[in-house]
Image (cartoon, rainbow, N blue to C red):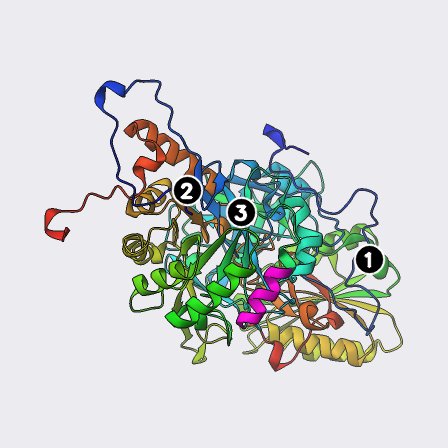
Amino acid sequence: MKPNACDRNRRTLGKPGQSPAYRNSPGPFAKHSPISPGEARSAIIETMYDEIAAVAGNQPLTGGHFILSVRSPRQAQEARPGQFAMIRLLGHSDVLLRRPMSIYDVRPEVNGRQALSSNSGAPVVLDFLYKIVGRGTELMATLRPGDKVGLLGPLGHGFFAEDYLAEARQSDEVLHVAGGIGIAALVLPARELTQAGVPQRLFFGARTRDDLVGVDGFEPYVRETILATEDGSLGHRGYVTRPFEEHLCRRTGQRLLILACGPWAMLEAAVALAQRYGQRCLVSMENRMGCALGVCLGCCIRVHGEGHGAYERVCTEGPVFWAEHVVWGKDALPKT
Amino acid sequence: MPSYTPKAETQLPSPDLQTSTFVSEMQVTIAGVEFQNPVLTASGTFGYGQEFAQLIDLNRLGGICVKGISADPMPGNPPPRIYETESGMLNAIGLQNVGAKRFLEEKLPFLRTLRARCVVNVFGYSTEDYVRCLDILNEGEGIDAYELNISCPNTRCGGMVYGSDPKLTEEVVAASKRAARFPLFVKLSPNVTDIAVFARAAEAAGADALTLVNTFVGMAIDVETRTPRISNVTSGLSGPAIKPLALRLVHQAARAVRIPIIGIGGIASAEDAIEFLIAGAGAVQIGTANFYAPDTAIRVADGIADYCRRKQLHLNQLVGSLKLPDSAVQ
């Protein structure tokens, strides 16, 4: 199939007629057969676009966090919960690679954050929640409305609808466990789950209160938000995994589904707790990425499997994995 | 026999031949393989081609060098595997690949439908490994050439070990040349004292062309944790940061051998590529730029054509046309 002019950035993954069943979802604690990273999974992703897009806003929040809004109607309309995009800063050849960013939100309005929970009208803007952590994000923070960025997306499998929605509907409650800007990957699934009528709860931890950004956007979708800060400046003092464990303990006997995104250590702890209490858990992984196209193999993480199947790409096989598919522990530790 | 010599005496077209309708010849033949233009995508930066099929028109590429293939599948190195540095990136992927057999079954059928030439990068831990890999690949239909990777800095044995000892270079190239059913390019390491020695060793052992260069061994440290940024500790530096270093090596190698040279190292624009051509490369490869600008190879090919039109030069007149100052000519 030869791409035509207006359609040339359209990519179709998976084969027509193939079921979209996701291969890394064989059930809790199941044995995994070796999976090759070279192999395209049957996919929910239909399209991706590589374009130069205009910045619609770059709103500063507390603690060096920002929400970058980029206008791309077709990417906003294609984006699924849990997917990400690659942002390229133009004109800075010292900052070479694109930056992977969770799609925090998609919305119709260009102006104002009040549209966050809006469901009316087709989305045209993608929001990215980020924190200044290095030169790339420092430069990103200087972007102004009207500036141009490279935008490649939507990418990755995200929370694959058939599996996770079915699982969520059968659960008594979905628990979101977010650490820092990991919350950015969970807002869209929270909205989708609300539309599906699934009760939800948010456990959100960060270093200090200034890092607890994006709670407002989440609150319409959850029956309760439990906050934790390491310095105790807001919510529980300590790690968010502690109130999370208390909740798991109280809900023993119920069927829960956990969606987690955050730093490696938090994910590892959350996954261990989920397994201890026999609950299923989906993790949205972060890693440094070179291309997000599946070719550089830089973002691979260790998964259960032998030899060639031992690593999978966060960009292509992920970024969302069933927790039991990922190898946790020191040997598998990617630096975040 | 090489179809052309990069050091060919260049003759600028005489003024009376210059017309406004000058059409420059962009085709290039390297070791008998005809490329529609001199721009290839580099191994390890372009997967098996198909990954880019919906982003760019693959039929406009001169060639595609696929991810390094070994006789048996390789799992690669533990994470972290990459780290961005100023105007460059470090990587130590560890040659994760599907293995020669699955490459033939799953990847080659797509590649052979393309106008872009298919160059298969070959890796092994030992001379026997290289030969075994070639034996499997020789069965493949649609392979145009091999690129022998004797320069990977990120594997414990094999790879750069072969590329940093001229005797071993000769040994593995000679054995591979005997085994190879298709023309053999040899990808050299820049991490040597005298590139000319290795270029000549590969040429003497039967290499049909040289690819220069693979990544420069580098390193980065996280000062907060005092740990290496990459699990392999050392890693290969690529990207625009290495362009002047790679250009120097191409320049020196081009003066040491008569076989064609394919220049690679930080090329991100047509001007970058033209520098390599002038220095003596008969073709170029685009590597790291594919990650952040997948259309680079096509833009570079177009830009070379524009330049040749403007200068009223055919490509083969450009190759090796560096004008050295009298003081530098011995």
Residue A220 drawn at (x, y percent): 72, 55
Q: Is B111 on the left-hand or right-hand side of A16?
A: left
Q: Quick one: SS at disc 2?
A: loop
Can residue A108 be seen from the camera position used here?
no
Q: Residue furthest left?
A: B327
Stretch of the chain drawn in magenta: B126-135
Q: Are marks 3 and 1 in contact (CB under 8 Å)?
A: no
According to the picture, the residue beneath numbered tag 2 turns out to be B3
Residue A62 drawn at (x, y percent): 50, 61
According to the picture, the residue beneath numbered tag 1 turns out to be A163
According to the picture, the residue beneath numbered tag 3 turns out to be B64
Q: Amino acid at mark 1?
A: Asp
Tag nearer the camera, 3 or 2: 2
Q: Quick one: SS at disc 3?
A: strand
Does label 2 lie on the same chain as label 3? yes
Magenta highlight: main SS: helix
Q: Are marks 1 and 2 in contact (CB under 8 Å)?
A: no
Q: Amino acid at mark 2?
A: Ser
Q: Is A45 on the left-hand or right-hand side of A75?
A: right
Q: Quadrant of the N terminus of chain A?
A: top right
Does label 1 lie on the same chain as label 3? no
Q: Quadrant of the C terminus of chain A?
A: bottom right
Disc 3/disc 2 C-alpha distance (Å): 20 Å
Q: Is residue B128 magenta?
A: yes
Q: Is residue B214 magenta?
A: no
Tag nearer the camera, 1 or 2: 2
Tag nearer the camera, 3 or 1: 3
